[in-house]
């Protein structure tokens, strides 16, 4: 598999991936497009796209997105990484897989959306720069859509066979991956099967091995579509089985995720009015425990296995009509999620806690978005309203539980466990036509986010935190209100015959930001049932999710220059600052300033790239979250590729060439005993690793 970043603001229209396996995406000044597989030498020119050949990003697709300006990787495990974008991550980003939004299966987001996007199956990743348009749903920051490979429609009535397959091996975790699509199509019909399998061991670093960091994942499914007149329909189904996979920053590891996806689309035109529709379901079954991959607790009473379920039904219908020199999109969407979490001890059938019982979350949205131009100025103006409902069923506990959790469950059951609210978002995105190689961008937005079910309904003090992985015990708050962000960002895109440069400055003022705060005013004094239970779980100073005030601001830049016909430099610089506005503290888990610079020598059939990654110290850390500071570091990588024949390419490289021992600030803290990383120590980055991959397409 090849990984290329297409970052030029001039990129527009449709991108065709190699052979019959195609993925399409529109791009503009408001999007970044990452072409994950394919041969750009066949379909693009360097002048138009400024590709940046990148080293292997590991098994997690979030690592690919993290190379973009403003982005970073939240490393919660081999298959549990999250994208941070300009300081925000988790549910604050609008992340989709193949156009589908869905709820994570576990209370700690061990399966964030990109968990379901194995790199061998992904063709294109589209990233909304800055903020996501209202047509894509709510969310405080940019959006990400990882679109799968497909055998696309071809010309003529004869069926043509196509495939796109990748095989890869890595040394740092002794892993391998193989996957792709194969099928047939003509001008009216398309069909393909898809599948992938990945398996890897524990990760090596200069000081030894990170215990409980192995992974295993398998996906299989199919995609089909048909065109008739002005209409196109499509159906996609797939099943993913994630096997035993380590999560050192969490108190448990993945035992399994078994997830089914189905999505149907119908787009077309009737009487001059265009319409688009999509309906989908995602059904997740999940188990995690603290004894399979990591050393089991010495006391049988401390064994834990948690079972979780999540089902998401979603749908969207929109019409597009001409209006005042542009297009007006009017639409409705709905998302309905049911969740349930039960904690057990396999050694004691009387020990069980239905800690998040019968959670029901529903969102119904309406939106209007106009896109058009007035002379040199392009505009995308959108507004949406969302009607939120959330409720929790009655918590239950087994007879083996002491009175503390029983009393907390009774108090929760006696409380008002239903919540509803209406939110309104507005987005103005303006950009100029390119003139003499210069275009301008401006975004103003008002965005909202409803608190998640863990933040609202967690009555039992546990380390379920929605993926924060900071080692703290958390308690929810039924009185949480929505986050509200006021956003402004401005940038320019500069492009010449042999260079491109895209600086952006941004500011986000967020009222009612959901953040952990001390449970009560008497910190270190255990005088409540919640603190007593938290202390039994190893944390005498639990945190309570609460609404605070925050702000994030920064700058990111990417650019490149062609030094000769065959040699170019490409680089990215990202800086974000996250602070509390209500007290003197920093936001938790904010990426330190970082930069990368790659020198690429490219010929018609081969290329080689040498890259330097520079990361600064991060000492602006959250005292509230007991966050540890980290030192800066520099890494060096080298990658090369060669086209062996038409549709056959080979790439290989070495990452962290000098085997640097470093701590990635956005990694969590180790929770696994008998590892070469001490308990409570920041998890190290990967050691030196070689990789090789083969890509076949037709």
Image: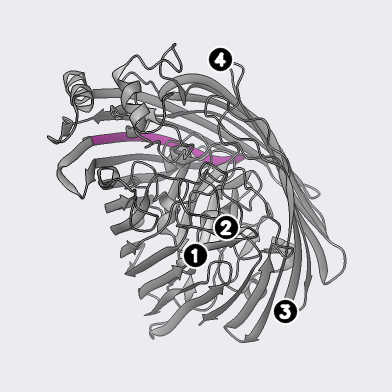
Task: Tell me which label, 1 or 4, sits earlier in the chain.
Answer: 1
Q: Quadrant of residue 209?
A: bottom right
Front one among 120 and 619: 619
Q: State yes or no: discs 4 and 2 in contact (Cβ < 8 Å).
A: no
> What residue is shown with label 1?
119
Task: Tell me which label, 2 or 1, sits earlier in the chain.
Answer: 2
Would you say 650 lies left or right of 353 here?
right
Magenta stretch bounds:
359-373
- Measuring from the top left, give residue 695's x and y in whole percent: 55, 78
* Residue drawn at (32%, 57%) of the image: 255
Front one among 279 and 641: 641
Q: State yes or no: discs 3 and 1 in contact (Cβ < 8 Å).
A: no
Q: State yes or no: discs 2 and 1 in contact (Cβ < 8 Å).
A: yes
> What residue is shown with label 3?
606
| Label 3 residue SS | strand
Which of the two discs, 4 and 2, sits closer to the camera?
Answer: 4
Task: Tell me which label, 4 or 3, sits earlier in the chain.
Answer: 4
Between the C-alphas of marks 4 and 2, the distance is 35 Å
- Measuring from the top left, give residue 227's x and y in whole percent: 34, 68
Task: Tell me which label, 4 or 2, sits earlier in the chain.
Answer: 2
- Measuring from the top left, give residue 637's x and y in whole percent: 72, 64
| Label 1 residue SS | helix
Between the C-alphas of marks 2 and 1, the distance is 9 Å
Q: Residue furthest front?
A: 298
> What residue is shown with label 2?
64
| Label 2 residue SS | helix
Task: Tell me which label, 3 or 1, sits earlier in the chain.
Answer: 1
């Amino acid at each position: 598999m090849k990984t290329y970043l297409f970052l030029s603001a001039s990129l527009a229209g449709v991108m065709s991936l190699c052979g019959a396996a195609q993925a399409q995406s529109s791009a503009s000044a408001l999007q970044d497009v990452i072409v994950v597989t394919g041969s750009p030498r066949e379909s693009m020119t360097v002048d138009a796209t400024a590709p940046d050949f990148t080293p292997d990003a590991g098994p997690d697709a979030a690592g690919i997105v993290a190379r973009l300006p403003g982005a970073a990787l939240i490393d919660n495990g081999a298959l549990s990484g999250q994208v941070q974008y300009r300081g925000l991550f988790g549910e604050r980003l609008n992340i989709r897989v193949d156009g589908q939004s869905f709820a994570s299966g576990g209370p700690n987001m061990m399966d964030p959306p990109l968990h379901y996007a194995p790199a061998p199956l992904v063709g294109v990743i589209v990233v909304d720069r800055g903020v996501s348009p209202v047509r894509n749903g709510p969310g405080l920051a940019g959006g990400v859509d990882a679109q799968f490979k497909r055998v696309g429609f071809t010309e003529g009535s004869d069926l043509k066979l196509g495939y796109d397959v990748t095989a890869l091996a890595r040394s740092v975790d002794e892993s391998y991956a193989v996957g792709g699509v194969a099928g047939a199509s003509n001008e009216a019909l398309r069909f393909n099967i898809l599948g992938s399998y990945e398996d890897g061991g524990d990760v090596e670093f200069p000081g030894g091995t990170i215990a409980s960091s192995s992974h295993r994942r398998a996906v299989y499914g199919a995609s089909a579509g048909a065109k008739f007149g002005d209409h196109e329909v499509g159906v996609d189904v797939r099943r993913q089985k994630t096997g035993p996979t380590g999560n050192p920053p969490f108190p448990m590891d993945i035992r399994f995720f078994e997830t089914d996806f189905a999505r149907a689309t119908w787009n077309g035109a009737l009487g001059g009015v265009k319409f688009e529709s999509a309906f989908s379901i995602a059904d997740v079954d999940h188990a995690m425990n603290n004894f399979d991959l990591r050393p089991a607790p010495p006391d049988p009473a401390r064994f834990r296995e948690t079972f979780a379920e999540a089902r998401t039904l979603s749908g969207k219908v929109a019409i597009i009509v001409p209006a005042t020199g542009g297009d007006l999109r009017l639409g409705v969407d709905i998302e309905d999620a049911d969740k349930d979490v039960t904690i057990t001890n396999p050694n004691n059938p009387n020990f069980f806690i239905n800690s998040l019982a019968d959670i029901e979350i529903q969102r119904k949205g309406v939106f209007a978005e106009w896109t058009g131009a007035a002379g040199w100025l392009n505009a995308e103006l959108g507004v949406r309203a969302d009607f939120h409902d959330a409720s929790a069923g009655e918590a239950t506990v087994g007879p083996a539980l002491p009175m503390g959790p029983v009393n907390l469950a009774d108090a929760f059951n006696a409380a008002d466990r239903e919540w509803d609210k209406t939110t309104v978002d507005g987005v103005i995105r303006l950009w100029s036509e390119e003139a003499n190689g210069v275009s301008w961008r401006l975004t103003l937005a008002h965005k909202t986010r409803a608190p998640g079910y863990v933040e609202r309904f967690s009555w039992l003090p546990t380390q379920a935190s929605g993926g924060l992985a900071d080692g703290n015990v958390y308690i929810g708050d039924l009185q949480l209100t929505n986050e509200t962000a006021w956003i402004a960002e401005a940038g320019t895109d500069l492009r010449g015959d042999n260079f491109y440069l895209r600086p952006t400055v941004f500011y986000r003022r967020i009222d009612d930001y959901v953040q952990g705060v001390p449970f009560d005013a008497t910190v270190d004094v255990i005088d409540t049932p919640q603190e007593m239970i938290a202390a039994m779980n190893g944390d005498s100073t639990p945190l309570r999710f609460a609404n605070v005030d925050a702000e994030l601001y920064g700058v990111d830049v990417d650019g490149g220059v062609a030094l000769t016909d065959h040699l170019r430099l490409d680089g990215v610089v990202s800086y974000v600052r996250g602070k509390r506005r209500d007290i003197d503290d920093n936001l938790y888990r904010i990426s330190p300033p970082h930069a990368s610079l790659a020198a690429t020598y490219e010929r018609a059939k081969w290329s080689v790239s040498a890259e330097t990654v520079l990361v600064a110290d991060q000492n602006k850390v959250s005292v509230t979250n007991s966050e540890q500071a980290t030192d800066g570091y520099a890494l060096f990588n080298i990658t090369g590729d060669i086209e062996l024949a038409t549709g056959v390419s080979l790439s290989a490289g070495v990452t962290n060439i000098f085997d640097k021992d470093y701590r990635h600030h956005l990694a969590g803290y180790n929770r696994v005993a008998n590892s070469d990383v001490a308990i409570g120590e920041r998890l190290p980055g990967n050691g030196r690793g070689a990789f090789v991959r083969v890509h076949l397409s037709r």
